[in-house]
Image (tube, helix red, strand yellow):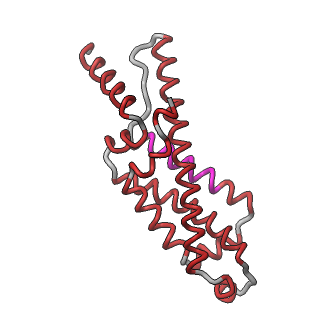
Amino acid sequence: MVLANRPWRLVPGLKSALVAALATGAVATINSTAWLMSTSLSWWRLVIGTVASVALVVAWLVIDGELWDRPEDDSPQSRERSRLYNASTLVTLLAGVIICYAALYVVNLVWALFVLDPHVMGTYLHTRLGHRDLFVLAWFVASAATVGGGLGSGLETDESIRAAAYSKREEDRRERLAQDRDRTR
């Protein structure tokens, strides 16, 4: 089900989120506060930032896009089907957001290597910095840009979020289920 949902197509399907993520990354990369924070954070805080940013965006997409499936009735089959759909939705979104995170990391790293001089950054921050610090900066900025992209997804319609998260076949199945529920009420 996850492969059928094509998680690698999540971000291109959410154009507002993509623009917000790229803009957040571009601005944060040249922001001295981001430089200072990235040089002061330990690796475990960067890992927590990564996990938190990915989790926040996945949760936001589920809530904002109304992607959580509810059982049609109290039968065990219906509850199990909803669990399966919800698990596939979460894994699809998680994979899509992780792909986005990795792409943002690469884009922000290339941007940082192009526009920043570690020596100038170090002079400004009164510390010695090298090119290795640009990798850490890109890591920090990727987390911020991921959250920025999540906020940008709020500009998308629920239909566009569902279209980005699900394959056409899954979207058709969900529409049929919704119509069947409406008829039985």
Which quadrant is the C terminus positioned in? top left
User: Residue 129 location, x and y as percent?
Assistant: 73, 80
Place residue 174 in its image quadrant: top left
* Residue found 55% across the figure and 43% down from its top: 95
Residue 2 as seen in the image, left or right of residue 65: right
Residue placed at 58% from the left, 74% from the top? 112
- Does the magenta segment cover residue 182? no
Q: Nearer the viewer, residue 174 or 65?
A: 174
Which of the 4 image quadrants contains residue 65? top left
Residue at the far left: name it. Answer: 183
The residue shown at (40%, 62%) is: 19
In the rendered structure, the answer to whether residue 50 lies left or right of residue 127 reads: left
Q: Which residues are magenta?
A: 49-62
Residue depicted at x 37% and y 29%: 169
Q: Main secondary structure of the magenta part?
A: helix
Give the vertical position of 105 relative to 65 (above or below).
below
Q: Is residue 50 magenta?
A: yes
In the rendered view, does 134 fall on the left or right side of 176? Answer: right
Q: Nearer the viewer, residue 26 or 77?
A: 26
Position above or below: 94 against 168: below
Relative image position of residue 45 (x, y in whole percent): 70, 59
Percent across and percent down for residue 60 are 46, 46
Side of 147 relative to 139 (left or right) = left
Disc count in the image?
A: 0
